Amino acid sequence: MSKKKKKRKQVPCESAVPSRRWPTTRLAYGLLAAGYLTAAIILALTVPTHQDGDPRRTPPDESAHLAYFDELLTTHRLPLFHSGTGNYEAHQPPLFYLLSLPVCLLGRALGHGVLALRLFVVLQGLGCLAAAWLLAGAIFPARPAARFGTVAVVAFLPSHTAVLSAVSNDPLAEFWCSLALWQSLLLLRMPLTARRSALLGLTLGAAALTKTSTLFLFPVALLAVVLAAQRADRPLDQALRSLAIVLAPALALALPWLIRNQLLYGDPMAMKAFIAIFGRDRATPDFFFQRVGLSGLQYYQLVLWQTFLSFWGVFGQACVFLPSWFYWLGVFIAAAAAVGGGSLLWRGERPDSQAKFTWSILVLATALVFAFFLRFNMVFYQAQARYFFPVIVPLAAALCAGLRGWLPHELASDARAQWAPITVLVLLLLIMALAAIIFQQPNRPILDYPFLPVRAASSHVMAHKASCQRRAQLSLAPVGENQHLRNGTNTAKHAGEQYNLFHNPCGSPFRGDCRWSLRL
């Protein structure tokens, strides 16, 4: 009688079988989407527009995007820099505006044009959450907790929710960026087919037609194709063939717009014309070098610190802050993720080859966006974290990956235990989101700069702003004409037009612009 071999029960490893029971997936993501919609709609309804309320609280660049719609409806053609409006967003590609135009028309017919557009952008934010869910799933295929945490950061990060509730082409551009990164990671995990390559090319082209700053996706897609082609028998041939398939639809969509800009402005990106318009009333590094006395290192310390604060929440015209504890909470979350990530490395945890390829794609995308941000701040002082939102999903994924390091070594691979730090993160984000709705106050004192040489910069710049405001009050209407100041807004009519207290007294011709004369 032959002995029956006892079949050993194989315990699946953590990377092979994700947990689907903790918590109930559909309910969790449904609550997350409902929470995002609630916060975004409240902000869309309560944040003042450029036409009323406190102009310091108006979303950044919203008045310029609305001017784009005005020119579309008035002239029935795309805006031009030399049309005389002074709109610095006239160089933006048209996809967002054309898709939103029916909503704009309907809203204006009902007497709520700005609100209709804001709510339409809120719906686009749901698309950003869906794309974040796809991309987070590709980053963490076997870690549902980290995937959920990544999407929760995208949904509840206060500064991001504010962007998703204002009139802007940023949310649609972010959607295309997250979708393109997801498609790029799919090429690393699945066969490199012509269909997948063509779909990636279409996404790249749509992103370029939404915002030119998304062109960083092209080298990212190039790297993804090259890495994916290494699995083929003839890697070079496969890479060249796939690159041609990717670039064909992408260039077919993007080239007409780039050629138009080249013919109009002598620059496919229209950056020279943009800088000429945008730089009329923006602070530049020279202001901090000459008037404040900062060195180059101190200037970039100031930029990075203010950008870090704005990542968690600096609203309106970069002058609406929250209580100091809010920013200390952001410092705590960032420090916890950094220490946890260091703990994982100290334990000797190393990603496999597939994870290395994944993170190389994400690191390249983030590095390119960071390089653009530094280059932009070499021309203008724009210490705003919203410029990083095209790669908010990789940033959120890195945050969630680091928090796992706080688990004991024996629990770090347990699917249920991984929900503990993510649950704490989500609760803290909900507290911050609620604070962003309740406690926004213009010019509220916040965390002092940690670098002693740059502390004087804040008070110096704010004093300059106050001086510009006083000059604005004296220059908006002719002498002898009745003026009435209410809630920081000059409501006097001059030549049939309504001016704003923060209309630039230094010569900007952009009518109805609610920006500061010196904008941080």
Image: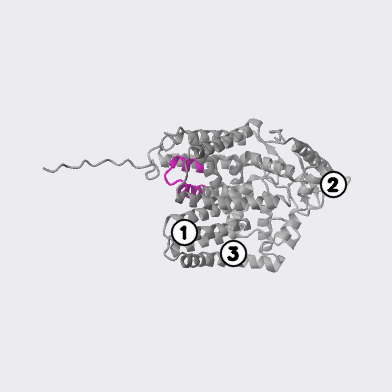
Q: In this orientation, does residue 367 appear?
A: yes
Query: Is 307 situated left or right of 8 in this image?
Result: right
Camera-side mark, 1 or 3: 1
Residue 400 in the figure: left or right of residue 309: left
Apparent side of residue 244 relative to residue 141 in the rendered image (left or right): right
Other-residue count near label 1 (Cα within 10 Å), few / some / many at <14 / 14–19 / ≥20? many
* For marks 1 and 3 on the same chain, the one whose residue lies earlier in the sequence: 1
Q: Mark 2: which amino acid?
A: Ser
Q: Main secondary structure of the magenta part?
A: helix
Residue 101 vertical position relative to residue 234 in the rendered view, above or below: above
Report the mark closest to the observer, 3 or 2.
3
Residue 29 lies, with reference to residue 66, above or below; the image says: above
Q: Which residue is mark 3?
A: 254
Q: Which residue is mark 1?
A: 228
**Quadrant position of residue 38:** top right
Q: Residue 376's spot in the image, x, y percent?
A: 69, 52
Q: State the quadrant of the N terminus.
A: top left
Which element is circle 1 on? Answer: helix
Decide if residue 433 is in sight here.
no
Q: Earlier in the sequence, mark 3 or mark 2?
A: 3
In the image, taking residue 423 as reference, residue 503 lies left or right, namely: right
Query: In front here: 58 or 274?
Result: 274
Q: Which label is found at residue 157?
A: none
The residue stretch that appears in magenta: 129-150
Q: Earlier in the sequence, mark 2 or mark 1?
A: 1
In the image, is residue 460 part of the stretch drawn in magenta?
A: no
